[in-house]
Amino acid sequence: MKKQLILEDGTIFIGKGFGSDVNSIGEVVFNTGMTGYQEILSDPSYCGQIVTLTYPLIGNYGINRDDFESISPAISGFIVKEASEYPSNWRNEQSLDEYFRMKNIPGIAGIDTRKLTRIIRRYGTLKGAICSINENPEAIIEKLRATKLRNDQVKQVSTKTPYPSPGRGSRVVLVDFGMKHGILRELNKRDCDVIVVPYNTSAKEILSLSPDGVMLSNGPGDPKDVPEAITMIKELLGNVPIFGICLGHQLFALACGANTEKMKFGHRGSNHPVKDLLTGKVALTSQNHGYSVEENSIAGTPLEITHIALNDGTIEGLKHKEVPAFTVQYHPEASPGPEDANGLFEQFLQMIETQKEEGAAACQSVQI
Ligand SMILES: NC(=O)CC[C@H](N)C(=O)O
């Protein structure tokens, strides 16, 4: 069935529908990853967004049981050049079309995704609609221009209640702002005793769980839309080691007095080079963000810039100068990779150990 993709700037693409037939509106963004489409479509950070992939053939290895980053995708739509109708892989269970039908999410294929990406790069991320060919484009464009997109995405995707993911190692409270399961997997792989909590848990409740460390997850939307999380992080600082990823990094920056801003079209892909300013090393990283920490806002805060993006110089990592806390804008847990930055989880656990030793030494000196 024919469908249209309509952008708020008035551009209309006609393509072939796949997945659900519902009409959908969202912020249109592009991801340049050549593989990992299942992880992308199930990453809750894309909540409310329509994602286009610049790689032209998508769905060729199907949808499998193992590669989800969340139980249900939160994206508003999917745009591809060609959606493979005959996926082939030993793990394949469903085609893209079958999966999106089941999840009631619309897709559109057969459009010029290069042209679309160039529009987004020129204009910036913009609102768009995937809709039936029978809709009147003028009416849709007007509707798009008048629509204010939702700003409660974190609430939509965060867990509603806390739950444990037990291990025998360090106790880590993982704040779920729309967590990719990869973060939990990386902590469990290191035998952490994880407790996942909702985004609006207070610092007091978190500290009552006696954590050795707190992990702030990725998540959708504008960090300024979750002020309760900023307060929570402010109150945690200095009481427990903190490691934040992506939205967690942005919230940490806001809690420390820095500012965040919306980027023109963001960073979404799996080969973004990032330089570690402390070691001089460059890592290839997976990224998905539309906001960044404003460089000029760092002066006067207790923060130090530790990483920068080599493509545009934006901030990619921060460290607190006085208390044990560091964050990155990119995804060290990324699946299917790259894994260059995976060692940051060891760095977090090392920070926890150092804190435990310092705590024990302080207790001993009090006893003496
Ligand atoms: N992956 C993320 O956590 C994204 C963070 C934030 N929603 C942004 O777009 O910048």
Image (cartoon, grey):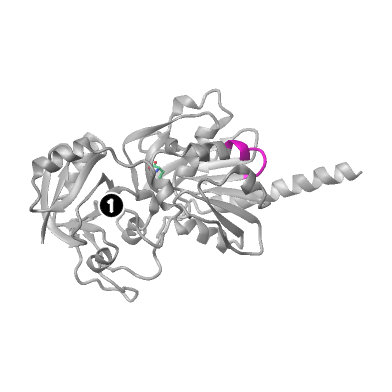
Total number of numbered discs in the rendering = 1
Estimate the x, y position of residue 215 in percent, counting from the top left: 56, 49
Q: Which residues are magenta?
A: 234-241
Estimate the x, y position of residue 107 in percent, counting from the top left: 21, 57
Label 1, secondary structure: give it. Answer: loop
Q: Residue at x 30, y 47 (%)?
A: 49
Q: Quadrant of residue 60?
A: bottom left
Asked whether residue 283 appears in the rendered view, the answer is: yes
Q: Residue at x 64, y 44 (%)?
A: 204
Q: Dot 1 corresponds to which residue?
A: 76
Query: Does residue 21 lie above or below 364 as drawn?
Result: below
Asked whether residue 270 appears in the rendered view, the answer is: no
Which of the two residues, 63 or 321, is positioned nearer the viewer here?
63
Kindly give the residue lying farthest to the top in the view shown: 300
Estimate the x, y position of residue 355 in percent, counting from the top left: 70, 46
Q: Residue at x 49, y 38 (%)?
A: 251
Asked whether 201 falls inside the magenta stretch, the response is no
Taken as a whole, is the magenta stretch helix, strand or loop? loop
Asked whether 239 falls inside the magenta stretch, the response is yes
